[in-house]
Image (cartoon, rainbow, N blue to C red):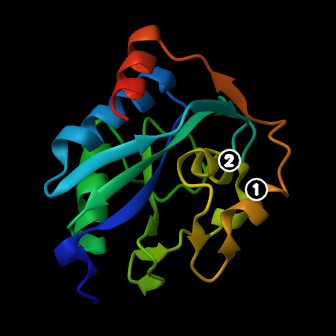
Amino acid sequence: MSSEPARGVHAFIGIGANLGDPETQVRDSFARLAHELPQTRLIGRSRLFRNPPMGPQDQPDYVNAVARLHTRLEPLDLLAELQAIECACGRERDGTRWGPRLLDLDLLLFGEQSLDLPGLKVPHAGIAERDFVILPLLELAPSLQIPGVGPLERLAQRFDGASLIPIAEPQEAVATAEGRG
């Protein structure tokens, strides 16, 4: 492992939900990421987007977003913390791929690292094919280089965003986000 976590890295987290009250769950997850992760700060967040499910279509639409963190945690430690938040929010891991979720927190990127560890692959598998990841990432870091994939701006050109519906933010959330600078 590199020494990057000692000084900290930027990590990007994909957030999704399509059961219960997905908008509230995704918004609440930003607060959880900001306050419940040790050695970690939430430094940015994308807008929320509604989009059709990936995989089986006989489930509700998803609400997705991306968070940008600065963390001193090691990748597997950060993953464990994200999974603990999912569990606290009622997520049960039953092995179902692309099924309905109360909350899904995916470690998309961890600094400039490419990792292939048991239970963790970074950049996240399929990142380049998911408009609900690429377009929110573009809001947070337009000049980002995705390790082993290439420039985010180039990837974003492949998507027209037609399947993503931006969700209006409550006025207080917008004011808070604007005030952070």
Q: Helix, strand or loop at disc 1?
A: helix
Residue with the mark numbered 1 = 156
Residue 166 falls in which quadrant of the image? top right
Q: Do the residues labelled 1 and 2 touch (CB within 8 Å)?
A: yes
Q: Which residue reaches farthest left?
A: 38
- Neighbourhood count class around disc 2 (C-alpha, 10 Å): few under 14, some 14–19, many 20 upward: many
Q: In this view, does 103 lie to the left or right of 76?
A: right
Residue 69 coordinates in the image, percent (x, y): 34, 53
Residue 164 coordinates in the image, percent (x, y): 74, 34
The quadrant of the picture occupied by the C terminus is: top left
Residue at image position (62%, 55%) is 142
Residue with the mark numbered 2 = 135
Residue at image position (20%, 67%) is 72
Q: Is residue 52 left or right of residue 49?
A: right
Q: Image height check: is 135 above or below 74?
A: above
- Neighbourhood count class around disc 1 (C-alpha, 10 Å): few under 14, some 14–19, many 20 upward: many
Residue type at tag 2: Leu
Residue 87 coordinates in the image, percent (x, y): 28, 45
Residue 115 falls in which quadrant of the image? bottom left
Q: Nearer the viewer, residue 5 or 36?
A: 5
Residue at image position (86%, 44%) is 160
**Upstream in sequence: badge 1 or badge 2:** 2
Disc 1 to disc 2, C-alpha distance: 6 Å
Instruction: Give the mark count.
Output: 2
Q: Is residue 64 left or right of residue 161?
A: left
Q: Nearer the viewer, residue 80 or 177?
A: 177
Residue 75 falls in which quadrant of the image? bottom left
Q: Helix, strand or loop at disc 2?
A: helix
